[in-house]
Amino acid sequence: MSNLKEFTKGFIKENPTLVTLLGMCPTLAVTTQASNGIGMGLATTFVLVGSNIVISLLKKIIPDAVRLPCYIVIIAGFVTLIEFLLKGYVPALYDSLGIFLSLITVNCIILGRAEVFASKNKVVPSILDGLGMGLGFTLSLTLMGTVREILGSGTVFGFSLPLINESPMTVFILPAGGFFTLGIIIAVINKLRHKKPPKEIGCKGCPNMSSCEKLRNGGI
C-alpha cells in the first residue's frame, strides 16, 4: 500500500507543477502544443527515474559536502542520453523542445526528488517516486498543451478542429496565455484538493470539541 501511495502522490496530491509549482520554465515554454508537453514530460520522467535509481544506490557513498554537484553530474548524464535518443530517433521533437531539453539538468523537480526522497530511501520506492512525479508532470504539461493548442491554434496533436481553427485565440500560444491557462488549472486543482469546510462555525464545528469539554471539566 505504501508503494502505491509513493507512486500516485505525484498525480494530484503532490503534483510537481500544479501543487508544488516546480518546473515552471518548461511548463510555460513548451506547452504551446500537446505533443511538446508529452515529449518534455516523458523525457523528464526518464531522467527522474534513472537519476533516482543511481542516487538511491549511491546514497551512502556520496559525501554530504559534494552531494549536490554529484546529483547534477548524475542527472546531466541521463539528460545527455535522452538528448542523443531524441536527436537520433525523434528529431522533430528534439528540435521543438530545443534548449529546454538541456535545461532538464537543473529542473527543480529532479533535484528536489533527489535531495528529498532518493537520497533517503531504497531503490524501489525511489523508482516509484520518480515514475509517479514524472507522470504527474507529463499529465500537467499535456493538459496545458492541449488547452493552449485547441484555443490558440484550433488544432489538437496537429489535427485541425472544425470551426475553432477558423478563428483561434492566438493569445493562448503566447506567454500571457500560458500564465492564464496555468492559473485556471491550478485553481481547479486546488478546489478539488481542499476539503469542504465544517457546516457549523464555532465550537460545534470543531473536531476537537470533546477534548476541550474534558479540559474545561477538569479531565485530561
Image: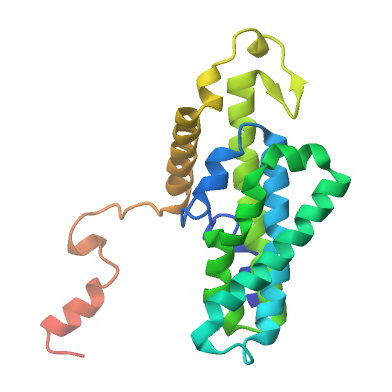
Q: Decide if residue 147 is in sight here.
A: yes
Q: How is the image coloured?
A: rainbow
Q: Position of residue 73 (x, y in %)?
A: 64, 72
Q: Is residue 20 above or below residue 51?
A: above
Q: Name the quarter where the C terminus is drawn.
A: bottom left
Q: Position of residue 114 (x, y in %)?
A: 58, 73
Q: Is residue 136 above or below residue 124?
A: above
Q: Name the quarter where the N terminus is drawn.
A: bottom right
Q: Decide if residue 4 is in sight here.
A: no
Question: Which residue is rendered at x = 68% and y = 42% of the image?
Answer: 97
Question: Which residue is rendered at x = 49% and y = 55% of the image?
Answer: 22
Question: Which residue is rendered at x = 71% and y = 37% of the image?
Answer: 96
- On the picture, is 91 further left or further right than 56? right
- On the picture, is 210 further left or further right than 47? left
Question: Which residue is rendered at x = 80% and y = 36% of the image?
Answer: 92
> Image quarter for residue 39?
top right
| Nearest the eye: 78 or 57 | 78
| Nearest the eye: 6 or 216 | 6
